[in-house]
Image (cartoon, helix red, strand yellow):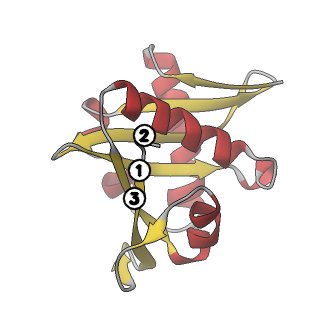
Amino acid sequence: MIDVIKVTTDEQLEDAFRVRKTVFVKEQGVAEEVELDEYDDVADHVVAYVGGEPVGTGRVRIVDDVAKLERICVLASHRKHSLGKTIMKELEAIAAGKGVAKAKLHGQVQAAPFYEKLGYEIASTVFMEENIPHVKMVKDLSH
């Protein structure tokens, strides 16, 4: 059973942070003080649960009337099960609910094909964030 829910409690937010620390800090080597930032307080977060266990997360903030999707990740043990797609759809629904017509994200280059399948287009050359190659990607949410 897969549940992707919008975070409404401190416990759910801690679940999101636990998944992010596993993927970004332990797996990819991002510094924890960079991974958990000042935007966590103002973003809307979602958590994916399988059998009650948190296995994926993401957040969305509105920046200059554009939804900025961030910190999207799924535990290695649960990748390739469409969880990322479900998380993205939930984040986009939150953004659309706020009346936002465009979304953007900084996707890791290796994940760009995943985002392209969801309708995102590459809108930059490759740049580095935390020593990981990224590209800016955009999508029109008004369809």
Q: Is residue 37 above or below residue 4?
A: below
* Near-viewer residue (62 or 16): 62
In the figure, residue 101 lies in which quadrant? top left
Q: Amino acid at mark 1?
A: Glu
Residue with the mark numbered 3: 105
Task: Sort mark 2 into few (<14), some (14-19) or many (20+) by Cα contacts within 10 Å.
Answer: many
Q: Residue at x 30, y 30 (%)?
A: 99
Q: Amino acid at mark 2?
A: Arg
Give the position of the N terminus as an image quadrant: top right
Helix, strand or loop at mark 1: strand
Select label 1 or label 3 by which is in front.
3
Residue with the mark numbered 1: 70
Contact, mark 1 vs mark 2 (Cβ under 8 Å): yes
Question: Would residue 127 be found to the left or right of residue 109 on screen?
Answer: left
Q: Is residue 72 above or below residue 127?
A: above
Q: Position of residue 55 (x, y in %)?
A: 69, 39
* Near-viewer residue (59 or 12): 59
Tag count: 3
Please report whichever mark, 1 or 3, sits nearer to the chain's N-terminal start. Answer: 1
Residue with the mark numbered 2: 59
Contact, mark 2 vs mark 3 (Cβ under 8 Å): no
